[in-house]
Amino acid sequence: MSRTKMLLPLLAGFFVMGFGDIIGTVMNQVKAECAANADDISWLMPVFAYVWFLAISIPTGVMAGRIGRKNAVLVSLAVTVAAMAVPLFASAERWYLYVVAFALVGIGNTIIQAALPALMSNVVEPSQLPSRISLGQFAKAVCAALTPVFVYLTATALGNWKLLFPLYGALTAGAAIWLWISDIPDERASGGTVGTATTFGGCFAMLKEPYVLAMTVGILFSVGADVGFSVAIPEYLKKVFKVDVDLAGMGPTVYFVAKTAAAFAGAVVFAKISAAKCFPWCMGLGLAATAAIPFVSTPVAFLAIVAFVALLTANSFGMCMGLAIERFPSKANEISSLMVMAIVGGGIVSAALGFAQSAFGPFGIVATLGVCIAYLFGLGLFASMSPKS
């Protein structure tokens, strides 16, 4: 099987990775069905969106080292299939089953995010990893964009929004079968882990490498900026431009459409130009655009700048992970696990945004996002000047 054909089931895995966004997408439907317990659901569901990144990312790396990266991804797909079955038995009286289902979604999503980029290194040359991870992020973004459409279609055309779950369960099962029958080489047989098992200590020991530590913190700020923009855009539109609440809620769509386009563009560009060379230019321009936000006077201009920032910064996640694995390809399990654990940064930055908004108003939001992108700009300079080992 050619490298291109081996890449296709991995991209299907990235598409399934996008199912993790289902938690936020169906929140309103679940709360409407379980109105008596809506308050409990409101805080439990976001917790399960982030806690697993902190709790099981490193164990996933250890598991991948023992059973193989391909088998670890298959475990994640099996967990996701189970997650999609549970909501069919949920109801207003059994609302806790939704919590169970979304906990399983979070577990499956954490495992696949930790194991799949490492598995990609089995079939992709190290220098091409940033490009291929960006392509995977494009597949994930397409899924995230389609989920609201599927929710609407199942609710209107089929009469029950919960039919989304068996649909996604079937797609996940198909992706699992495709991966299972693929001829992706086992890194354990080829000596890809240099004869050493992945351990907890080995994962955390990688933080002693300044390059890996810097890139891991970069993931925290990358995810933080991503989550931050999705939260901040409606707030900024409402507070500064007095836009209607419902219309302001559509604002993040501009950001995510631009982000999806940028992920595809990144896959093309990084295949020809080193991601390390592009990194500082993208983040520097993104920082300048973010700094310009307080000076725009119309919501259209604001959204135009938001789209521009998304185009420039959307590939920061793929660049951080790809460049780190490119530098230490034999430590892909450890690096992927550390960086997925850093996704918890989305929750940290969200909390910082709330504090900044309370203390300084809308411009506190912009300043917080600027700090995230400023770090990524510095990281880009560091990556472009850091010699390969």
Image: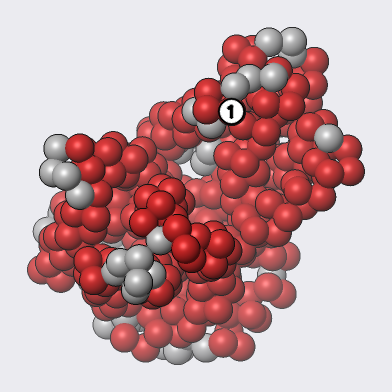
Residue 360 lies left or right of residue 116; in this view the side is: right
- Residue beneath the point at 48% across and 83% down: 59
Q: Quadrant of residue 85?
A: bottom left
Amino acid type at mark 1: Val
Res. 105 in view: no
Residue 230 position by quadrant: top right
Compared with 265, 115 (above or below) is below
Q: Quadrant of the C terminus?
A: bottom right
The residue labelled by disc 1 is 245
Asked whether, in this view, residue 332 is left or right of residue 55, the answer is left
Q: Secondary structure at mark 1?
A: helix
Does 56 sit above or below residue 300?
Answer: below
Q: Is residue 1 visible?
A: yes
User: Which one is nearer the viewer's eye here, 205 or 101?
Assistant: 101
Query: Image point 54% across, 67% down: which residue?
Result: 40
Q: Position of residue 369 (x, y in %)?
A: 73, 40
Near-viewer residue (36 or 50):
36
Q: Residues within 10 Å of mark 1 (few under 14, many from 20)?
A: few
How many numbered markers are drawn?
1
Given residues 119 and 356, the one toward you in this image is: 356
Image location of residue 129, percent across then percent down: 42, 52
Which x, y percent locates residue 123? 29, 60
Residue 113 in the image: above or below residue 78: above
* Structure colour scheme: secondary structure
> Where's the N terminus, which quadrant?
bottom left
**Residue 198 x %, y %:** 48, 85
Q: Is residue 344 left or right of residue 256?
A: right
Q: Residue furthest front?
A: 36
Residue at 20% x, 37% y is 156
Compared to 122, does 159 lie above or below? above
Residue depicted at x 25% and y 49%: 161
